[in-house]
Amino acid sequence: MATDTRADSGEKVVSIRRCACVVKGGRRFSFNAMVVVGDGNGRVGWGYGKAVEVPLAVEKAVKAANRNMMSAPIVETTIPHQVTGRYGAAKVLLIPARPGTGIIAGECVRAVVESVGVTDILTKSFGSNNPINLVKATFNGLSQLRTREEVARLRGVEI
């Protein structure tokens, strides 16, 4: 696989899993791929694809990720406030960090926050360590983020 072309377009393969179907002649294998796509400027999406071969599964996942893009607010190089994302048994705690801290996160959460364009963040995952559920929990947390201006506008007050 040409990983350098994916890095240019902001695609990160989070997990690839092999599934076996037992048939009369033996086992028939198929593959699942989870991909995170982002522009590095506040927009990110995830996709899940299944196919007989890995490149096809990744291609389907990228198409699904581009269809399911969402935007997340970024304040300078981090997130506006602390938030907890949940999905199934997975919980992800996202904490804003000062400039220069870097991304302190596991592999799955790191893929999402790098793709969205955050460079300074602290994270902690609780519960399940399933990569797919961790990515979905991270997206749940990012969807809960609000900037000060947005909250003030919703409440009808001035900062």
Image (tube, rainbow, N blue to C red):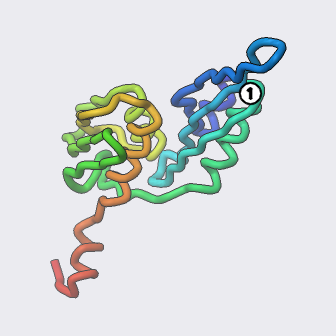
**Identity of the residue drawn at 23% across and 68% down:** 148
* Image location of residue 54, percent across then percent down: 71, 25
* Image location of residue 85, percent across then percent down: 30, 49
Vertical position of residue 69 compared to residue 131: above or below: below
- Left or right, 33 with respect to 120, comes to right
Nearest the eye: 40 or 52: 52
**Identity of the residue drawn at 31% across and 51% down:** 76
Tell me the element at label 1. helix
**Identity of the residue drawn at 52% across and 30% down:** 14
Nearest the eye: 100 or 64: 64
Nearest the eye: 22 or 74: 22
Vertical position of residue 147 compared to residue 96: above or below: below
Residue pushed farthest front?
24
> Are there few (<14), some (14-19), or many (20+) residues within 10 Å of tag 1?
some
**Identity of the residue drawn at 70% across and 23% down:** 21
In the rendered image, which quarter is residue 109 located in? top left
Badge 1 is on which residue?
A: 55
In the rendered image, which quarter is residue 138 located in? top left
- Left or right, 69 with respect to 23, comes to left
- Left or right, 11 with respect to 92, comes to right
